[in-house]
Image (tube, rainbow, N blue to C red):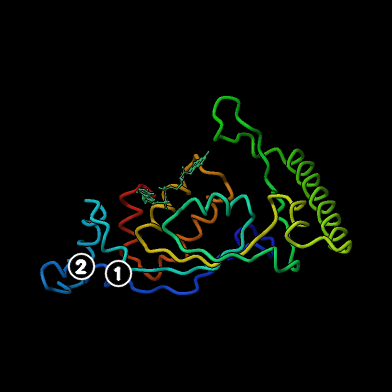
Amino acid sequence: MDIFQDGISELSLVEILGNDMRVVQAARVSYNCESKGAEKDEALIKFLLQEGHLGPFEHVVITMKVTAPIFVIRQWFRHRTWSYNEISRRYTSSDINFYIPKRIGVQDVKNKQKVIDYDNAAFSFVVSDKIRKHSAISLDLYYELLEAGVPRETARVVLPQNLYSSFYATVDLRNLLGFIKERSAENAQYEIREYAKAILQLITPHIPWSIEAWKEINGY
Ligand SMILES: Cc1cc2nc3c(=O)[nH]c(=O)nc-3n(C[C@H](O)[C@H](O)[C@H](O)COP(=O)(O)OP(=O)(O)OC[C@H]3O[C@@H](n4cnc5c(N)ncnc54)[C@H](O)[C@@H]3O)c2cc1C
C-alpha cells in the first residue's frame, strides 16, 4: 500500500502466522478442546477481547515491510514488543527520498497534539514547496560531503527527519492491536495514524473475526 500516494511510502504484509482459529485453539487448550463451531468460536474471540484475555492473540504473528519517514519511524520504534530491522545509512547512500507533506494545518494554540485548519490549500502549497526545497538543498550537501570523502555515517547528519527509511517489523497480534489503538487515535500524529489505519485494512482479510470484534469493542 502506498500510504501517501507518492510512489515511495510503503506498507506490505510479508507473512502472517496463524489466523482466527489459532486464537480459538490457544484459548480452548485450557479445556483440552479446539473448536465448538464457527458461531461459538467467533463469539469466544469477542469475549476474550472484551474481558482482556489477550494471551491467545499472541499466537498470531505478523511480519510487515514498511517504508516511512524517519519522524514516523521514531514514534513507531517506541513500541518495544516488536522486532525491527532497518536499512543502515552507514552502509548505503542510494535510494534517498523525502516525504513532502501535502495537507498542512496550523498548530492549535491550546492543545499541543492538535492541528487545525487543514483546508488552506494556498498555505499547504507554500509550506510544501519550502519543505521540498529544503530537502533538495540537504541532499545536495549530502552528496557534496560524500564526494569530499566524508563517511556515509557522518554525511547523513545533514539529512532531515522527512527522509524515508525502510524496515522489517514483526509483532504478535496482541501488541499490534495495542499499537493500532494508540497510533490511530485522534491525538496521534496524522502520518503515523495513516499507517495504523492501513495496517488494520491489510490484516482484516486474514483475521476477520478478531478484527471485526476488536473494531466493535473499540468503536471503530
Ligand atoms: C499521542 C502520543 C504521544 C506521545 N508522546 C510522547 C512523547 O512526547 N515523548 C515520549 O518519549 N514518548 C511519547 N509517546 C510514546 C509513549 O509514551 C509510549 O512509549 C509508546 O506509545 C509505546 O507505548 P507502550 O509502552 O504501551 O508500547 P510497547 O512498548 O509496545 O509496550 C506494549 C505493552 O507492553 C508492556 N511493556 C512494554 N515494555 C515494558 C516494560 N519495560 N515494563 C513493563 N511493561 C512493559 C506494557 O504493558 C505496554 O503497554 C507518545 C505516544 C502517543 C500515542
Seen from the viewer's position, the closer of residues 37 and 146 is: 146
Q: Amino acid at mark 2?
A: Asp
**With respect to residue 148, does 130 lie above or below?**
above
Q: Position of residue 115 (x, y in %)?
A: 60, 36
Q: Amino acid at mark 1?
A: Asp
Tell me which numbered mark, 1 or 2, is placed earlier along the sequence: 1
| Residue located at (77% from left, 44% from top) | 125
**With respect to residue 182, does 201 lie above or below?**
below
Q: Position of residue 194 (x, y in %)?
A: 55, 53
Task: Give the residue pinned by disc 1.
Answer: 20
Task: Give the residue pinned by disc 2.
Answer: 41
| Residue located at (36% from left, 47% from top) | 219
Q: Position of residue 200 (x, y in %)?
A: 44, 60
Q: As drawn, is 175 to the left or to the right of 7?
A: left
Mark 2 falls on what kind of element?
helix
| Residue located at (60% from left, 59% from top) | 3
Q: Number of callouts in the render? A: 2
Task: Say whether marks 1 and 2 touch (CB < 8 Å).
Answer: yes
| Residue located at (59% from left, 50% from top) | 191
Label 1 to label 2, Cα distance in Å?
A: 9 Å
Would the CB of label 2 be found within 8 Å of ligand 1?
no
Structural crowding at the residue carrying mark 1, measured as other residues with C-alpha within 10 Å and reported as few (<14), some (14–19) or many (≥20): many
Mark 1 falls on what kind of element?
helix
Q: As drawn, is 51 to the left or to the right of 118?
A: left
Q: As drawn, is 174 to the left or to the right of 106?
A: left
Seen from the viewer's position, the closer of residues 145 and 23 is: 145
